[in-house]
Amino acid sequence: TVLYVGPVASAKSQTEIYAGIAWDDVTRGKHDGSVISKSTNQIVRHFKCGPTQGSFLRLSKVDVGVELTPQLMRSRYVRPDAELIAPDNLLPHVARTSSGRDKPIEFWGEVKLRNRQQLEVVEEISLRMLGISKPPPDVALVLEEIAEFNHLRGIDLAGNL
């Protein structure tokens, strides 16, 4: 959880902006949100958390996630007319056998599999581990755009922010 955004009294550069983080894992951090000021040698509290729960991160290191958009919902699914991954049922990779020979990897049923995984026919979709952290800012506009997903019974969002 971000509890502070601003300069940090113990930093080399007092103009650089940091995020003060309180980790869910109380042993992951290094402090309780307070530091010793470089200029005054006094303790400065930027935020409060457990004794080893806090950290300061440069803003460039903070992942704020992505919005849940129709484009993101479509990103895990391939259109039936998209270019085949395995033309002639062969993937562009090989497996090395125990005797050291390269053996082509076959992928049978790609078109049939694609047809069963179209957004228009599935009832549940998986958006795991995509870094989704928030809904889009204009939900009304998106509701219009996502009418194509009204048939979905479930969206798996495990592993998101």
Image (cartoon, helix red, strand yellow):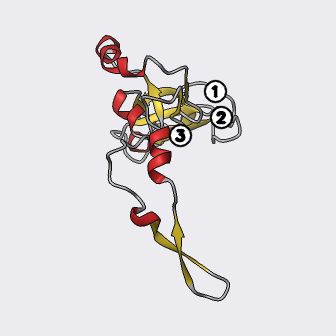
Q: Are marks 3 and 2 in contact (CB under 8 Å)?
A: no
**In the image, what residue type sits under mark 2?**
Gln
Q: Residue at x 42, y 37 (%)?
A: 18
Disc 3 or 2, which lies upstream in sequence?
2
Helix, strand or loop at label 3? It is loop
In the image, is residue 102 above or below residue 15?
below
Q: Is residue 137 left or right of residue 150?
A: left
Q: On the rendered image, what quadrant is the N terminus found in? A: top right
Q: Quarter of the image holding residue 22?
A: top right
- Residue behind mark 2: 53
Which residue is denoted by mark 3 in the rendering? 129
Q: Amino acid at mark 1?
A: Cys
Q: Residue at x 48, y 71 (%)?
A: 93
| 146 or 132: nearer the viewer | 146
- Between the residue at mark 1 and the residue at mark 2, the CA separation in whole angstroms equals 6 Å
Tell me: 139 left or right of 125: left
| Vertical order, 21 against 10 (above or below) | above
Work out whether 20 lies above or below 85: above
Of helix, strand and loop, which one carries label 1? loop
Label 1 or label 3, whichever comes before in sequence order: 1
| CA separation in Å, label 1 and label 3 | 27 Å
The amino acid beneath tag 3 is Met
Residue 29: x %, y % from top left? 63, 40
Q: Decide: marks 1, 2 in contact (CB < 8 A)?
A: yes
Are there few (<14), some (14-19), or many (20+) residues within 10 Å of tag 2?
A: many
